[in-house]
Amino acid sequence: MSVYQATTSAPVNIACIKYWGKRDTKLILPTNSSLSVTLDQDHLRSTTTSRADPSFKKDRLWLNGVEEEIKDGGRMATCIQEMKRLRKEVEAKDSSLPKLSGYAVHICSRNNFPTAAGLASSASGFAALVSSLAALYALPATPSELSLIARQGSGSACRSLFGGFVAWQMGFKPDGSDSLAIEVAPREHWPDIHALICVVSDDKKGTSSTSGMQRTVETSALLQHRIAHVVPARMEAITAAILARDFDAFARITMQDSNQFHAVALDTDPPIFYMNDVSRAIIALIVEYNRVSVANGGKLKAAYTYDAGPNAVIYAPKENLKEIVELIINYFPQAEPFKDPFGLFGAAGVQGKVVD
Ligand code: DP6
């Protein structure tokens, strides 16, 4: 008897140009393009196993060992259905293939980072789901083609199908067929950039991205300015900065875009606050660190960015990491020893824990 099963994994990505707003909530089509860096450590990943079997009665899903309902018409159901549709196309071309598209699937997914770390798991989760089904179904699809489906699970998930520097092109077609992720540059193009994650709070966020961004679309005048007059130029400028390995420009744009995203959240009615006092104190620290460097004739040395929560992600060239970690430890005394699961100074990346 044949066993039809595949396991793949996908990493978390952190946006430099933020996705915030949908023009189509069902297809998950964004109001602006976005760009992110996929974290390449093995420590921040979702790993998913999918199995198809004629004895399975219905599609089922387990997240971190707990079974979750797959709601009819929901995002998970849509992704599974879309993947089965692609398999069906392949089966139609080759009648010798087993008819896996007709079998139910069982899917098990695990994050190797604590959900409590306050890191978005939907991006890596849906990317791993789609890639494991693509492997199970032996689909000839490219990562960009798969990103069309991962996007319908969670917008930011489409970017986790690539490593390195990734753009999600908003597209213009109403059916979403051109709203997909593309690689801007592979990780090896600029291996010197690292991400330091400062966990300010591991509480579950107050306003989810999905509902928060919809409220912003409905009420924020600033968002309209951002999508029409700010993001298109920033996408071009940050792409050029990445291709030129120009950290100064990359850092400037990344921080500006994080600031504008949080300004847009504040411009929402009622307002949304994702950062807290510690988040703002980390911003002040990085601003001062950069100011001193520039005052001494140097360049920007670090860039902060914040998603829909208070935790900081700091991008920096490797040579500055030790100094940045020392600064953070100095100004934010740690309640617990600084967590360094990756071998702090010299590994592929570092993770810190800043305690409120
Ligand atoms: C602030 O992708 O989680 O992290 O599409 O509704 O699932 P849905 O939203 P999601 O939003 C991510 C928002 C962000 C910015 C970003 O990653 O670009």
Image (spheres, rainbow, N blue to C red):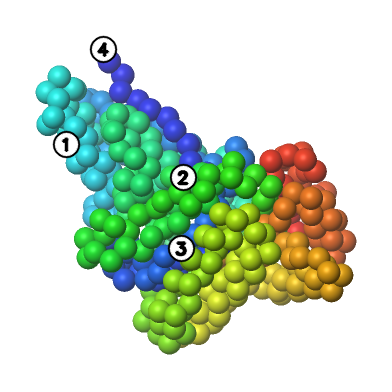
Kind of element beneath mark 3: strand
The kind of residue on which mark 4 rests is Met
Distance in Å between CA atoms under marks 1 and 2:
24 Å
Query: From what the image shows, is residue 256 above or below residue 170?
Result: below
Mark found first going from the N terminus, 2 or 3 = 3
Residue 348 visible to an observer of this rendering:
yes
Mark whose residue sits in front, 2 or 4? 2
Q: Where is residue 100 drawn, in percent x and y?
A: 21, 29
Residue lying furthest top in this view? 1
Badge 3 or badge 4: first in the primary sequence: 4
Q: Quadrant of residue 189?
A: top right
Residue to which mark 1 is pinned: 89
Q: Which mark, by number, is residue 162?
A: 2
In 3D space, how far apart are the residues under numbered discs 2 and 4 (Cα atoms)? 35 Å
Q: Amino acid at mark 1?
A: Glu
User: Helix, strand or loop at disc 1?
Assistant: helix
